[in-house]
Amino acid sequence: MRKNIVAGNWKMNKTLQEGVALATELKEVLKGQKPNCEVIIGTPFIHLASVAEVIKGSVIKLSAENCADKESGAYTGEVSAAMVKSTGAEYCILGHSERRGYYGETPEILKEKVDLALANGLKVIFCIGESLEEREANKQNAVVKAELEGSVFHLAPAEFANIIIAYEPIWAIGTGKTATSDQAEEIHAYIRSLIADKYGKQVAEDTSILYGGSCKASNAPELFAKPDIDGGLIGGASLKAPDFKGIIDAF
Ligand code: 13P
């Protein structure tokens, strides 16, 4: 059975002190609770080790937002998958449209990152999704198919079991414009059918597919009620503990 997951993506927000304070507050609001979903927070690299200490003994799990496409060596400023793993993080977000768009991360680069993250024992939250222009040209299915084929469909079935997919239509990220629950369900079902074609029905049924893009406590219940939407990848609303808790409570 696949897991329901609510994952935060802090992006480039919060100083170390602010991030530790947010993680501490989130741990407090979740104390004694048994959420009906896995709870993950994705933080900048510099927060990982400190936040890992804060969330010890809580239900919260930790993710990086990126990792390098090289194993180790002379790559000034980069952070490897092994380094991420050594902080206590269990997950790594890869393929976010902001990385693809602003930092030129191609499907080939992302394939390297996915392989290194998995080889180092991290689970990958792999993001896919179309731009507004592509949606208006009705190309969204072709876009997500190419993104999966380009960076994760080379994996063996046992490796793919460590992949979580996040469908994030670029036009819905940070815009306040959410995909309707029907729009999201339609493409989530399509993504699951692609996984079934590649890996078989059981693997497809076991894969969590998250929705991301202006997801908040007010729209999460309707989105999460859809059969193929297994949770959310949350940007803005993950930066305040009560807002994030509101989304967790949607399950
Ligand atoms: P927002 O929730 O701020 O729209 O961001 C979504 C996102 O990009 C999560 O990765």
Image (spheres, helix red, strand yellow):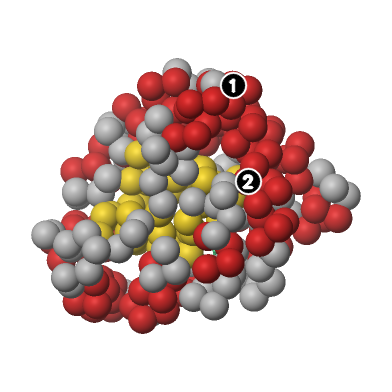
Q: Which residue is drawn at 68% across and 39% down?
A: 190
The percent position of residue 127, horizontal first and vertical second, equals 54, 47
Q: Name the residue under label 1.
A: 198
- Under mark 1, the amino acid is Lys
Whether residue 186 appears in this view of the structure is yes
Q: Image quarter for residue 197? A: top right
Q: Residue at x 27, y 45 (%)?
A: 90
Q: Image quarter for residue 156? A: top left
The percent position of residue 44, horizontal first and vertical second, equals 35, 60
Point out the image quarter for the C terminus. bottom left
Q: Residue at x 58, y 62 (%)?
A: 223
Q: Mark 2 points at which residue?
A: 188
Asked whether mark 1 lies closer than 8 Å to ligand 1, one says: no
Point out the image quarter for the N terminus. top left
How many numbered tags mark residues here?
2
The percent position of residue 201, horizontal first and vertical second, equals 54, 25
Q: Residue at x 80, y 53 (%)?
A: 135
Q: Is residue 39 left or right of residue 196?
A: left
Q: What element carries label 1?
A: helix
Residue 167's place in the image compared with 10, above or below, is: above
Q: In this view, does 220 lie to the left or right of 59?
A: right
Label located before the other in sequence (1 or 2): 2
Number of other residues with Cα within 10 Å of mark 1, as a class: few under 14, some 14 to 19, many 20 or more: some
Whether residue 113 appears in this view of the structure is no
- Under mark 2, the amino acid is His
Residue 159's place in the image compared with 59, above or below, is: above
